[in-house]
């Protein structure tokens, strides 16, 4: 992986804690942490927000995970797809469904509710936003207000992280490979209705 900002050396007490936690979780210190280490305050705030999200429990964990992966696929963030597949494996989620997220419109493995959640994630992440009254009404009826507010916030956070990773050239670091998992499916139809593959920075530069 060649990031647009070279990774910095992670130092100090806080840096040592981050490296210890990362090594325990992934078996290594991700290069992406070195990129963000150029501004430890930003890294700390982002990680803190991510940890707080993990404590929310009004919405089903699988739905939130699938929504985040749908955002990553739409935006083209290979790091988030790889990481969330790794986490799906560790949390015992349905790996077949996780693999099919990038082509969910063509796949038959998802329930009607899951398809609504994936559509909502893409609609929120499109520019301009394409969320419809009908879609929100269906989700509100199926999930209830607390869960829908939580899901919406998770999708918003996913946009923050995925767009930032793509902008900085942060790509997949092989988390899923380390678990012996199969590669993610190729992206299917995006919100526009046209094939939209996740493009890496190196591929984009070759155009």
Image (spheres, rainbow, N blue to C red):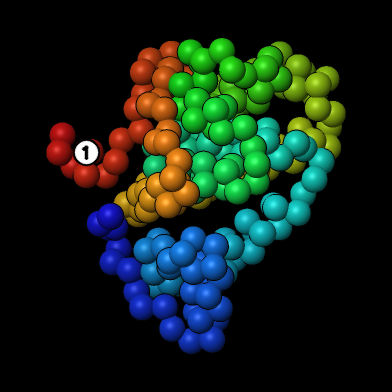
Q: Residue furthest front?
A: 180
Snapshot quadrant of residue 25: bottom right
Q: Residue at x 75, y 36 (%)?
A: 60
Q: Residue tagged by mark 1?
A: 203
Asked if residue 58 lies left or right of residue 22, the reply is right
- Give above or below for 88 relative to 168: above
- Residue 22: percent from the left, percent from the top? 51, 67
Could you tell me which secondary element the residue under label 1 belongs to? Answer: helix
- Give above or below for 6 relative to 177: below
- Give above or below for 56 relative to 3: above
| Residue nearer the viewer, 199 or 99 | 99
Q: Is residue 205 visible?
A: yes
Snapshot quadrant of residue 62: top right
| Residue nearer the viewer, 1 or 122 | 1
Q: Residue at x 77, y 49 (%)?
A: 56
Number of numbered discs overlaid on the protein picture: 1
Q: Residue at x 57, y 43 (%)?
A: 89
Q: Is residue 84 visible?
A: no
- Residue 162: percent from the left, percent from the top? 47, 45
- Residue 136: percent from the left, percent from the top? 72, 21
- Give above or below for 28 relative to 114: below
- Residue 127: percent from the left, percent from the top? 47, 29
Q: Residue at x 81, y 21 (%)?
A: 142
Quick one: quadrant of the C terminus? Answer: top left
| Residue nearer the viewer, 142 or 23 | 23
Asked if residue 51 lies left or right of residue 130, the reply is right
| Residue nearer the viewer, 60 or 180 | 180
How crowded is the residue under tag 1: few (<14 C-alpha within 10 Å), some, or many (20+)? few
Quick one: quadrant of the N terminus? Answer: bottom left
Asked if residue 90 lies left or right of residue 205, the reply is right
């Amino acid at each position: 992986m060649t990031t647009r900002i070279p990774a910095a050396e992670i130092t100090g007490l806080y840096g040592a804690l981050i490296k210890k936690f990362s090594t325990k979780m992934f078996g290594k210190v991700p290069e992406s942490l070195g990129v963000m280490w150029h501004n430890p305050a930003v890294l700390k705030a982002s990680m803190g927000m991510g940890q707080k999200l993990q404590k929310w429990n009004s919405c089903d964990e699988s739905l939130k995970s699938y929504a985040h992966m749908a955002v990553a696929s739409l935006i083209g963030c290979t790091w988030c797809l790889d990481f969330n597949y790794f986490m799906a494996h560790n949390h015992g989620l349905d790996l077949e469904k996780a693999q099919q997220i990038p082509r969910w419109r063509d796949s038959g493995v998802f329930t009607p509710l899951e398809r609504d959640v994936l559509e909502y994630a893409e609609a929120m992440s499109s520019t301009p936003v394409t969320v419809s009254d009908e879609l929100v009404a269906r989700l509100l009826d199926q999930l209830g207000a607390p869960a829908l507010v939580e899901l919406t916030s998770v999708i918003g956070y996913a946009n923050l992280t995925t767009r930032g990773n793509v902008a900085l050239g942060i790509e997949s670091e092989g988390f899923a490979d380390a678990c012996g998992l199969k590669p993610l499916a190729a992206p299917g139809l995006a919100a526009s209705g046209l094939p939209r593959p996740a493009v890496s920075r190196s591929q984009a530069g070759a155009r």
